[in-house]
Amino acid sequence: MSTKMREPVELLKADDESRKSESVGTPLTIHSVVLAGGSGTRLWPVSRQRFPKQLIPLVGEDSLLQSTVKRLDNLPSSIQVNQTLTVVCNEEHRFETAEQLRVCGRNHRIILEPSSRNTAPALTVAALSIVALHDDGIMVVMPADHSFDNIHSFQSAVDAGVPHAEKGDVVTLGVMPDGPELGYGYIRLGSTVDSHEKIRWLDGFVEKPSLEVAQEYFESGNYCWNSGIFIMRASVWLRAIHHYHPQIYSACYSAYKNGSSDRDFFRLERDAFESSPSDSIDYAVMEKFGRRDSICKGVVVPVDAGWSDLGSWDAIWKVMDKDSQGNASRGNGPVIFEGASSTLVHSVDRLVACVGTSNIVVVETPDAILVADRSAVQDVKKIVERIRDNHRELTVNHRKVHRPWGYYDSIDKGERFQVKRIVVNPGEQLSLQMHHHRAEHWIVVRGTASITRGEERFTISENQSTYIPLGVIHRLENPGRIQLEMIEVQSGSYLGEDDIVRFEDTYGRG
């Protein structure tokens, strides 16, 4: 990589006094760090391996990722906010993540994880990036799959936490509970900080409790829900992860130092990153605070802003607008309720009619339908595991699959044929490729297609077609200013997506 990094010893040798003196000068810049590596298994069939929940608009017009990256807009703070987001996501989701950030008009640096290693390694490579490019900075660390009803209250909590982070403390936002909740971890609050009646020292993390214990936590007033949102200096996190989990630090440092950049992404070195243990921010570092060997302090800033981690269909029902009977619906398909109550319907395409249902979730997609009792939605993850054994593709992709050039929709398929609707964005092109086991017929429905077929190069327009024989090198391009829409009919002995041999690719795919 082109950016020269300071060696770990330079980064970590400063003691508390030197860190305090650093904070006296020019205020540090705030950096939005978005962790977008989740899978959202419990939100199947809408959320799938290659198109997870953070990329989906589940509660508004924006996707959860887009809502997250806008969360610090117009932050009421005198400290400067860096206009380039740091986003960590899985390599599989890189193109759709980049496109959604482009649509938002956000400058970004996307760091690609070659495989999932949980949130502690993801935050470590983000901190390494900020230290390498800016020497240091205050990270506001946000998972990409949460929601807030009151952005002003969220921003006020961030603003209150920044001065403590600048001094070298690790700040976490604790969500004020509105009742006993079994699905969240809890934070135990300690004494007040600097006589501030609301901001408290972090006294410990507590795992998801039983109902009886959760009720005790709620009534005591000394516990908050763990939001997973943190504010801290990049250098402080690196010191902490080096101290408490040096294996993660070493693997991530090596993966970042030996990574590489292209025009859109920073790619971590695969072998080094995959050698990192998989661990969460809480387990790797945060739960260690308060012990005798703690190298920094944890501070809890309470936030009451309508927070939800949107981890299940029941959580989505709770944050949605409802009719007088508690029914909620969203999606492109029409929904009709008759004598129904407390029912959630998410319809992607087709009409869904619910008659006399109560406490039910119905999720319709073109290739799968989920029906579940709202009290059992946590078990959707178990169903996905069973589906993966016999129908793996239904847990990986939707029928409509996004690609960097556009998308395709698998309309129909049989033993030796498959029909796809292919849409190519203006100026984009598919890879120069060949198939060993299938031939393809292309029919243009709208727009103009530029075709490479062996040594030939030609153009076809609406209502025209061409044929790509098995084993012939070919490429499809859209030279026009409108979307190219076409129907592809594949025929052959094997029609899987892995029967693609790429010779050239604009998007760096192998």
Image (cartoon, rainbow, N blue to C red):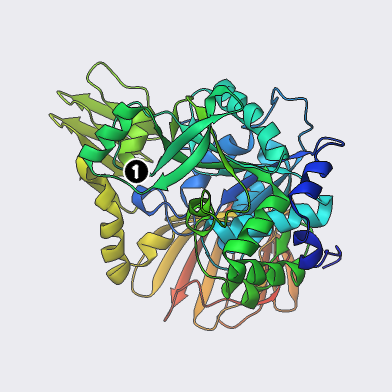
Rendered position, 470 above or below 361 = below
**Nearer to the camera, 388 or 158:** 158
Q: Residues within 10 Å of mark 1 (few under 14, many from 20)?
A: many
**Nearer to the camera, 451 or 328:** 328
The three-letter code of the residue at mark 1 reads Ser
Find residue 442 and report its horizontal and vertical position in percent: 56, 63
**Nearer to the camera, 114 or 399:** 114
Question: Quarter holding the N terminus?
Answer: bottom right
**Badge count:** 1
Find residue 105 and report its horizontal and vertical position in percent: 72, 37
Q: Secondary structure at mark 1?
A: loop
Q: Which residue is mark 1?
A: 312
Find residue 216 and report its horizontal and vertical position in percent: 27, 33
**Nearer to the camera, 379 or 252:** 252
Q: What residue is drawn where x is 54% and y is 41%?
A: 229
Query: Residue at the top extreme?
Result: 324
Q: What residue is drawn where x is 16% and y is 31%?
A: 358
Rendered position, 6 above or below 270 = above
Q: Is residue 340 visible?
A: yes
Find residue 10 and report its horizontal and vertical position in percent: 82, 63
Q: Is residue 382 left or right of residue 27?
A: left
